[in-house]
Image: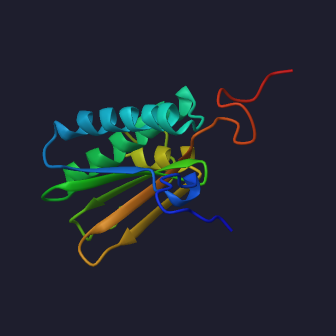
Amino acid sequence: MDHEEPGDDRHPLATRAISVSAAFEDDTGIAEARDMAHTFLTRVQAVHGLPVSGRAIGMVQLVVSELVTNARKYAPGPCLLTLEIADGAARISVWDSSTTLPSILAPDPSRIGQHGLEIVAAICVGFAIHREPVGKRITADVMLADDPGGAPSGRQVL
């Protein structure tokens, strides 16, 4: 068991939440949300020393863009984006005021559009949609390292 002496400001990483949140009210917020995700993951790597692959940064930005775009398109009012680090993954959570739960359509190569959630669910290690007391929350998890057991740059080809 860890014991902290008075005045000891060291805390184990596991006990500190690493997260950021922001509300977005208009369509310009979509680009701001992507930028926020990039900045957050860059700081996670630089400040906290956690491995974050370039692929993970791109995937998180893609998921953020899709979820915030959907919230802005289909729900009135602002949406809330929360990014946090949990179990070696970036957890992306978007709340909006609509109580209508989206559905992930079956793959259909002839369909034009509406592939966003299908793609998000395919690239994430976790994906959930929950009704909230007001509105709904969609949560998706993207692994920070391409090879969770090894290098952040991915598996080495032998």
Q: Is residue 51 left or right of residue 25?
A: right
Image vertical order of residue 25 relative to residue 127, above or below: above
Q: Is residue 119 among the parts visible in the rendering?
A: yes
In x, y percent, where is residue 137? 35, 64
Q: Residue drawn 34% across and 40% down?
A: 65
Residue that appears at 21% across and 65% down: 97
Query: 36 and 50: which one is in front?
Result: 50
Q: Quadrant of the N terminus?
A: bottom right
101 up-or-down from 89: above or below = below
- Number of labelled discs? 0
Residue appearing at x 39%, y 38% in the figure: 40
Q: Residue extending furthest right? A: 158
Is 75 displayed left or right of 19 in the figure?
left
Q: Residue furthest bottom?
A: 133
Corner quadrant of residue 29: top left
State the image coordinates of residue 37 (x, y, percent, origin top left).
Answer: 37, 38
Which of the pair 60/8 is nearer the observer?
8
Counting from the top left corner in percent of width and height, residue 69 is at 27, 44
Q: Residue furthest top?
A: 158
Which residue is painted at 16% across and 55% down in the image? 78
Of all residues, the one furthest to the front in this rendering is 6
Picture quarter with the C terminus: top right
Is residue 81 positioned above or below 132 on the image?
above
Q: Is residue 110 visible?
A: no
